[in-house]
Amino acid sequence: MLGKTAEEVGRSLATHTLRLAITGLSRSGKTVFTTALVHALTRSPEHPNLLPFLDIVGGGRLVDVTIEPLEGFDFFPYAEELKKLTAWPPRWPEKTTEMSGLRAKLRYRPKSAMLAKTVGLATLNLEIIDYPGEWLLDLSMLGKTFDAWSRETLALCNSGARARLSESWLRQLALVESDGAGVDFSKAEATAQRLGEAYRAFLKACAAPIPDLKLLQPGRFVCGYVPEDLLFCPLPPESSGAGRGWRGWTTPKTERQALYRVMERRFERYKAEMIEPFYRKHFARFDRQIVLVDVLTALNAGHETFYDVRRAMTGLVENYQFGSGLLGKLASKLGLAKIKIDRVLFAATKADHITPAFYGGLRQLLEQMATEKIGQIRSDGAAVGFEVIASIKSTRNVTRDYLGKPLQVLQGSLTESPDIEDIFNPGIIPAYLPGPEDWDNGYITFFEFAPPRLMDADTLGIPHINVDKALQFLIGS
Amino acid sequence: MTDPDSPNHPKPGRVTLPLWSDSTEGPKEGPRLDPAKLDPARLDPASRVAPRAEDAATMPPPLSDRPSIPLTAVTAEERMAVGSKPAPPGHASQNRPKTGQHLPKPGSITRHGHGPDAAPEAAPKPATQKPTQRPFTPAPAAQAQQAAQGDAPGRPRPGRVALPRWQADAEEEPRKSAAGAASDDAAAIPRSRRGRRFWRALFAFILALLVYDVVDRVTMIWEHSPYFGALFGFLLAMVFVTAIAAVMGEIRQLRKLRLAEVHHARFAELLIGGGQGKALPLTVRILPGLPTSEAAKERFAVTVHDTHSDRDVIELFNRTVMHPLDRQAYSIISRAARDSAIGVAVSPVAALDTVIALWRSLKMVREIAQVYGFRPGLPGTLLIARRILVGAALTATTDIIGNLWAEHLGGRVAGFLSAKLGEGVFTAIRVARLGLTTMEMCRPLPFLKEDEPSLNRLRKEIISGLL
């Protein structure tokens, strides 16, 4: 009797739960990362060489790993995704727009010999949750009024590539006046709906592979489900009351106010019904967070997209500075629970698309993308790390002679021709934030590689780059 | 390895196979190249700006449009010509003082200032070779490589007019330091001479004490009974002779091993270099000579990847290959410490203590060296030899002092015993310390921070061995 209780106490001492959230702006490889991660974890007790830099694996202490569904979440379709990746021809997974999760139960021998003698095996319940990064971007809307948000968003919509794409929506906005909408309340609702749809179409156009912009709010318009009656769009602040005309905006004062009020109500409802529940139910409960960033595609897409991604990233970083950070203040103001995330890792994905000589440069660039002031995010809040990873290594590094000197190049096959393997010389990673002129010389060019043959993944494992180091940073302690 | 900074880093693109290495001669014998690739205009950034600007907004251009590597097609003259073209005005002289890195013009394939061979080429036209042309900073790894190639970051290209400050400094430096050294020496020499004289005197004193101790002991027994005296003296002489023979044997065996310090220094360099791709060949070179189990070697081979950085490779090597050896070394040290403690405690004369300590320490050093398959280099050997000799001398002194103390106390058994035990413990600690130093000297890889050897660590290893 007594022995049993002692055993139970020991077991409870040796059981930990960690909730690891995996996110990233769309097409950054969340699904691939999650699949590869779970696969490596389940294979690593027999093949410790798969994750050598994860201490419990490298030290040979991991005994077994079981995968279970996680209560309250859709089960991450691990088996299906793995099948797709290991099939021939292999395909990268489809874009995910919803949240899903699973629990990996890791049983391992504790590091200290004392503990190993007394409790035997320890258990780590690693709850892995995968959600779209756009939802994370939305968090910054929590602290803003409709007025402030509209100002920012409209200014953004009139700059760069957005100006071209937002034309039709802005024209509709300007035309609202001519069909006399806004006077009576039901018409204002209908107008708001129409404008909201136009705005959503604009955001979706921004998110398309060209120009692949990332700083899109509200993110659920692009990624995820939004009730139709929650669509809204930013309105010029002048329309809330008396003001000068804006871009030919001449709706009578009262009508503009009616529309404005409808939009504002929708905005507040979106915050209360979409963002806050996510914050309360999920975000505040995460322990660790990994944010995947596809730096190479951002670089490929040109100057504007790159800096758009950077702005989105700095916005994300702000979320984690809870000491003096935005969300900390906000949480106390709104009476929400404080977040407990104490480790955040930013990972530049697709490291296999460049040669190893540039990993250092990519890491440095990632760091610079995330920080506006150096050292700003290390001082308080969560520990922030940076890593260069490839969930699935789809190329091989080979050396060729170039002008009498050895040159590292990549061997792999491109996505458009997955069965032809060839040798490619990828571009150069600028080790600082590049200016517009740096795109002129053609060095910033990266290829999209198809997944490698993974038919023997079960015996050999999926080759990766630094996923183990990322894990060590996140769950190693 | 790639030198990404070098101006002849090719444009990104599909690499036409096969690539060949006799690059300076052009494609006379080699596979035919597309004439388009020979076009110098393709290499000139000015002609590339327009299409690129459009491409930049979109995804990478279709394959046929992608820039191909100009490979070897351009002769030296053409390269010169391309290299000396004035840069397009649009993006000239974007100097970024932050990086302090002078980089070559985009697309140019002339080699500027890499090593001395580039100097004559660059000297005649300094005006066209503005080193501030391309603001690309190479990755840190690349910087390290570059530094290794003797082209330090921020180093001016040949042909610049103004003598940079550091160069002037460098010229002044030797003079200054020579003068400083001279003045230092003037003060230092007498001091060090005095020190050396002191140590010599001390050594002679201890030697004299030892001889006196032996002679005293033997004569004491001789007086008691000449037969016993003769026997004792004979036995003692035999022990001395065998012990000295053993010491010589140890030294001979040690000399057969390879030098550790060469690899040690290379690995230490790679650890701080932050590079990639250099540690793996090195580990592959030393791996066969290491007496690790085949399983451990196999494990290392399947774990390590071509994408691991040098630091990663070294860490993995440490973990999979070196740690089992470290454990063996720790057990050798603890055994040696125990043996010499017992030996010192039971030996009757101080001189024998010395010889025992000397022999046991040397044996330990040899065993540790054999575990790693490497021997310490000359500085390491000198350091270890000094430690051994000082250790032996200290053992002798403590023994004599211990004896005196015990006699002074009236030769009681307990007093004698405790003095002997104290000597033993003292010797054991000295031997253990020596063992740890030897480990560091013999290991072909430097210790990483987390597994640096210490007495504490030794204790842990012993305890975990017991569990």
Image (spheres, grey):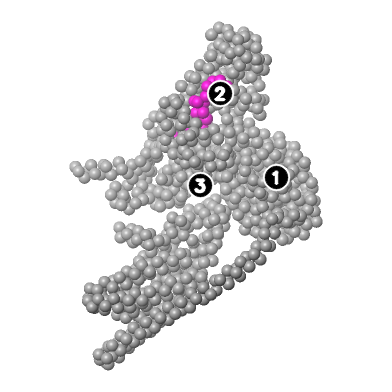
Total numbered badges shown on the rendered structure: 3
Based on the picture, tell me whether residue A144 belongs to the magenta stretch. yes
Q: What residue type is disc 3 on?
A: Asn
The crowd level at tag 1 (other Cα within 10 Å; few <14, some 14-19, many 20+) is some
Distance, label 1 to label 3, CA atoms, is 34 Å
Residue B103 position (above or below residue B346): above
Residue that numbered label 2 is attached to? A149
Residue that numbered label 3 is attached to? A466
User: How far from the left and from the top, in percent, is residue B199?
Assistant: 45, 76
* Marker disc for residue B87: none
Q: Chain of mark 1?
A: B
Q: What residue type is disc 1 on?
A: Asn
User: How far from the left and from the top, in percent, is residue A257?
Assistant: 57, 12
Front: mark 2 or 3: 2
Residue B111 position (above or below residue B248): above
Do the numbered discs 2 and 3 sit on residues whose CB atoms are within 8 Å?
A: no
Q: Residue at x 44, y 80 (%)?
A: B201
Q: Residue at x 58, y 9 (%)?
A: A254
Based on the picture, tell me whether residue B446 belongs to the magenta stretch. no
Q: Are marks 2 and 3 on the same chain?
A: yes
Residue that numbered label 1 is attached to? B95
Query: Range of the magenta residues?
Result: A129-150
User: How far from the left and from the top, in percent, is residue A403?
Assistant: 70, 55
Front: mark 1 or 3: 1
Q: For mark 1, give the secondary structure.
A: loop
